[in-house]
Structure formats: C-alpha cells, structure tokens
Amino acid sequence: MAKIDRVCVDSYQVPLSTVLADSTHGVIAGFELVTVRIDDTDGAQGVGYTYAVNSGAGAFHVLIDRYLGEVLHGQDADETERLWQDMWWKVHYAGRGGHATSAISAIDIALWDLKGRRAGKPLWRLFGGFDPRVPVYAGGIDLHFSIEQLLEQADGFREHGFRAIKMKVGRCRLREDIERVRRMREHLGDDFPLMVDANMKWSANEAVRAARALQEFDLMWLEEPTIPDDVLGHARIASDGGVPVATGENLHSLYEFEQMIRLGGVSFPEPDVSNCGGMTVFRKIASLAESRNLPVTSHGVHDLTVHLLASVPNRTYMEAHGFGLDQFLAEPLHIADGFAVAPERLGHGVELDWDALEQYRVPSEGRHDVTRARRRDAGASTATKGTPK
C-alpha cells in the first residue's frame, strides 16, 4: 500500500494582465497563489492550490510547511476523511476557518487529485458523475470600469462563449449602481441571466434598499450584500429585498454554511473549494444545500470546481473567475455555448506549467521539508537508541 512520502509547498505572486477592482478589496493588480504537491511511495503525485487577494497567503504557506505537512507523512493518501480531520484538529486552536481552512483546502485538493490519478478516473466520475456539461457565467471584476468599458467587456464575454454574466455593484452612490445595471440589462436583453455582486459593501438596511431598487432588472441573484458574519442580516435581505441572495465565498466551514442555510440567509450557497475546506467539504455543502432544495453555485478556481458541480444534481451556474490560471495551464477549461465541460483527464486534470510559474515564485526562507526532517529525526533516534541519559 502506497504511503504519502513528500509534501512540497510553493508560493507565487501572480500579476493580472488587467488591473481589477471591487467595493471592498480595492485595486487588485495580482493575486497570491499557494501550490501543494503530494508524492506517494509509488511515485504518483497530486496537486492542489489555493490563493489570496492582495495579501495573506504567506500564512497558508507556513501552516502547510510547518504544521500540516507532518500530519500527512507516512499516511495512506486514500483516507482523505481521516486526514482532513487530523489536519483540522492540528490547527484548530490556532484559528478554525480562515487561513487554516485555506491551507487545508490546498492539501485536500491535492489528496483528491492523487486519489483520482491512482484510481484511473477523472474526479467528476469518481465523485459519482452527474453531467460533465456545467452551466457557467463570467465573473466580471469591474466596479471601476466606465459604462462603456463594462458593456465592451460583456460583448467580449459573449464572444468567448458565456451565456450568463455577473457584474460588480457597490459604488459610492446607489444611483450609480442602478444606472450601471440598467444599462447592462438593456445591452444584454431581458432574458440574459445577469447577476450582481456587492462584495459585502452594505449594511443589511442598505442592502434591502438596494435590492428593492434592483428588483426591476430581474436579476439571477444579488451576491454578498453584506458581511458574512451577519447571518440574520442576510436572512432579512433575502426576505425583504425581493432578490435572491448568493453568498459563501467568505464562509470557511461546513458549520457556517449550515447556519446560513438554516436561518434563511441564502438562496444560492456559494462555496469556494480553495477556502471552504477543499473538495471534501465542498461536496458536503452541496449535499446540505440539496437537502434544503437549494441550488449550489461556486466561487473561484473554476478549473477545479467543474468536477464538483459536474457530480451533483443541484448545481447551477459555475463562476469562471477573473483570477484564472489559463496562461499557466497545459489545457485551460473549454467554454462554449454557456457551458464548461469537465475533462476526462485523470484526477482534476489540471497540469500547471511550473517553469512558467517559476519567475513569480516567492523565495521561502528556512523552508521546512517534511520528508527530510522526518528522515533526519529517524536517523538521530536510531543513532542514540539505548544511550544513557
């Protein structure tokens, strides 16, 4: 039986070709990418990754390098549920959710990739297989665009095969948001699926007011109208605003999703596989949503998420994220006629161009290699065995 032999973590500062902006993160010129490679004793490898906007990913790197990697060494990689629990409790006291869950997510994704490769199946089939064609929308990060730029971007999205679009709201004056959404709706037509995303800009009261003003535009959903901590505020927005609510990209545990769903704060649960706890937890969130007859959508990392939404019956539109890795992928996700197709390649099938990424790698001082440290400690233990203290 193959065991986990090595865990390697790397960090990269990846620039964006176009500077982006939203209502809370401000100007976004790039993102921080953290990758994990897990090798087993048979020579197979699984790859996972997570990311952060503007800052914070260094904490993911340290958690994996110094604490979580040692949980895995010598373990059976197929026991993903047990390993997830071991990692969760290893760093639980340091802060459940947040940075810890993003670090766990990257490892969990790598473990599932390894499992899929060893099983000889793509993950969407390993997960049960529902439909490889997943409806997809273009997630615009465009709050600072002029209306003309906004409409030009929408035309570009449609030319690239998208049949649903999300735009940002949350400008200084609500009337600006209303005018921008009005122009977008007129440009796209009445039947074109359109979502808006406030990125937590408003209080619950402000969000109710905004939602009511946006009702006339027949939106698919209003995303992240307020902070994720205000669960009862979400419930009030959903009940009083008159527009379906999507949220979840800043929820970092199964329990947070359960509370948001149970209290009626969300119409479209929206986990991000890179920060909710990985594929293990994303699948549980999808099942939880299904048990409440809710459709599940997603945030970010579409190259990974397509396998998850291709395997569940209650999926709805998947986000194609603005922080795509297409320039570093051997085979970027293909989008045509409003659908992304889950690949038949083994595991998640994402093949990163490590040479192209190398120029953006962040040097790591004092890197802790779990494999070498374990072997060194084992050697020291053998050498001193039986020595009087």
Image: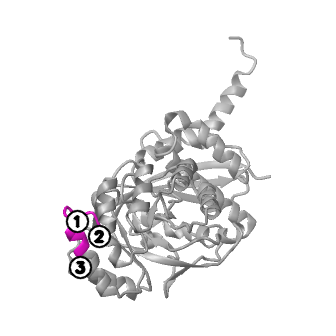
Tell me, yes or no, if residue 372 can be seen here.
no
Q: Residue at x 32, y 68 (%)?
A: 212
Helix, strand or loop at disc 3?
helix
Disc 2 target residue? 213
**Which percent across, then down, holds residue 247?**
45, 60
Q: Nearer the viewer, mark 1 or mark 2?
A: 2
Name the residue tied to disc 3: 149
Tell me the magenta residue range: 169-179
In what quadrant of the picture does the C terminus appear? top right
Query: In terms of depth relative to the viewer, which is nearer, 38 or 85?
Result: 85
Rounded to the nearest angstrom, the CA distance separating label 3 from label 1 is 19 Å
Q: Which mark is residue 287?
A: none
Mark 1 crowd level (few <14, some 14–19, many ≥20, 10 Å Cα): some
The residue lying at 32 percent from left, 72 percent from top is: 214
Q: Is residue 7 left or right of residue 141?
A: right
- Camera-side residue of 247 and 240: 240
Outermost residue, front side:
240
Q: Residue furthest top?
A: 389
Q: Quadrant of residue 129?
A: bottom right
